Image (cartoon, rainbow, N blue to C red):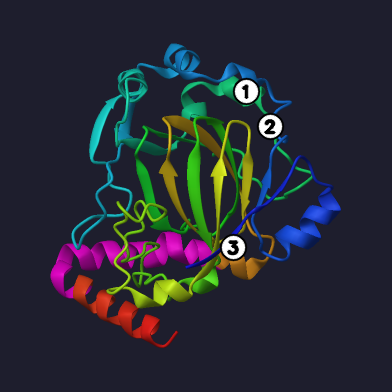
Amino acid sequence: MQLQPVDTVPMIDAGLFRKQYYEAKRPLVITDLAKSWPAYQRWNWDYFKQVVGNKEVGVYNNVKSDAYTPINKADGYMKFGEYLDLIQQGPAELRIFLFNIFQHAPQLTKDFTWPDALLKGFVKRYPMLFTGGAGSITHMHFDIDLSHILHTQFAGRKRVLLFPYEEQHKLYRKPFEVLSFANFAHYADPGKTALDKMQFPAVENAKGYEVILDHGDTLFMPAGYWHHMEYIDSGFAMSLRALQSSMSGKLQGAWNLFGMRNIDTLMKKTFPEWWYETKREKAFEAAARR
């Protein structure tokens, strides 16, 4: 992989941000954007347990999906407070994603400010919380709706690997899915990495970025960016999503949500092994041409 660090600034002028990052489709870390929010000081494990600890949530392990796995299918369920107790005790390879904590505790929306000066088109009904124990992994994927993301880390550290959407074939994208066939787990540790460079040679030519997020850091991920995340410490983050300004971008996101995903779900139920092998063959053919 050909990786470079993500640009990092304390704050940024909206015009400069739009020209150099939004329009250029380049990621950026803004270290001070969230530090004026009440959430920066207020949000912690005990506070979340107090306001939503009794809500049941889906939890996900580190196992990559197979031929039969529906997209976003949870590996188990537990009370949010019990989950938080578990991941605070030590390494726990369980994570929660796409948890709309604000539906259960709408008062939390008063703890942050939507950065409308930077991005337009925020989907303000759906800010999402992402939580993980130390060692948990979010495998390489891109967000299905192709939104722009502002991802703010509030506790713990997280290692993030990023690639532009256009690098999808070098990453062995599964056709009709948002996932990669390759396993990037522990990619930065030669002694533990799961990435088989012999099996996935095109990955070596992929051009991307990497960064470690800490408390208060906000990562801008342009629409369609591939990302792989590893929780160095137990922690949580919030993502604010903004729709693309172009109609073509909105339509592609809608197709992914309501067309592509439904076709893939149907084929997994009907011909799981054949569908998996067909997609694998197509992915490797595409990678070989890169």
Q: Which residue is mark 3?
A: 250
Q: Which residue is mark 1?
A: 39
Q: Nearer the viewer, residue 227 or 274?
A: 227
Residue drawn at point x = 56 percent, y = 20 percent: 43
Q: Horizontally, is 180 left or right of 28 in the view? A: left
Crowd band around label 3 with a 10 angstrom C-alpha radius: few (<14), some (14–19), many (20+)? some
**Residue 34: image tag:** 2
Residue drawn at point x = 35 percent, y = 16 percent: 54
- Magenta span: predominant SS is helix
Asked whether the viewer can see residue 97, the reply is: yes
Crowd band around label 2 with a 10 angstrom C-alpha radius: few (<14), some (14–19), many (20+)? many
Label 1 close to label 2 by CB (< 8 Å): yes
The x, y position of residue 20, in whole percent, is 77, 61
Residue kind at label 2, given as amino acid type: Ala
**Which secondary structure lies at badge 1?**
helix
Q: Horizontally, is 187 left or right of 211 in the view? A: left
Q: Which numbered disc, 1 or 2, marks the residue that appears first in the sequence?
A: 2
Residue drawn at point x = 32 percent, y = 60 percent: 183
